[in-house]
Image (cartoon, rainbow, N blue to C red):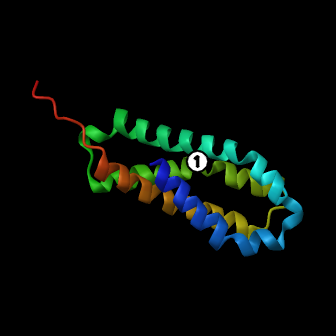
Amino acid sequence: GFVFVFASDFVIHTIWLMPDYNATKSLWRSGAGMASHFPWMMGVQLLCAATFVLIWALGFASRGTVALALTYGVLMGLFTNVNTIISYVVTPLPETIALKWFSSALVQCALLSLLTYLVYKPERSSM
């Protein structure tokens, strides 16, 4: 899960959103500032992936289906993206960035849920 989150965040933020970030440089840390905070980003991505998979494992995996996995992913995407909407409301964040953050996170969570469903297979109890 962590590898997927890290890789997809790279594609989302370093490739797709970079023109938007460059156009709004005054809102973001400098390259050196970002680099100094990179360990925090890695930790948050690990925490995100671990929490996502743990909630799936404890609450959904035993009755997991593709449809349930997708539903879980979309709901987790909506739940985790409340902050995106709040950030848009309270900071001078362009609407385009907020919409791209929101939509990419929904897709990312849906894909992470499918990956989790495909990889995590709990043993079925015979009791």
> In the rendering, at what x and y percent does residue 81 appear?
61, 52
- In this rendered view, identify the residue nearer to me: 118 or 84: 118
Question: Left or right: 126 with respect to 115?
Answer: left
Direction right: furthest residue = 26
- Left or right: 108 with respect to 92? left
Q: Is residue 104 left or right of residue 124?
A: right
| Quarter of the rendering occupied by the C terminus | top left
30 is higher (above) or lower (below) than 99: above
Give how far across and how far down residue 23 sits, in percent. 82, 74
Please give left or right for residue 13 compared with residue 117 in the image. Answer: right
Q: Quadrant of the rendered structure where residue 22 is?
A: bottom right
Instruction: Report which residue position mark 1 lands on.
Output: 80
Question: On screen, 93 above or below 44?
Answer: below
Q: Residue furthest left?
A: 126
Q: Is residue 103 visible?
A: no
Query: As shown in the figure, which amino acid type bears the numbered disc 1?
Result: Thr
Q: Toward which corner of the image does residue 123 lie, by quadrant?
A: top left
Label 1 Cα neighbours within 10 Å, binned few <14 / some 14-19 / many ≥20: some
Residue at 65%, 64% (x, y): give it: 13
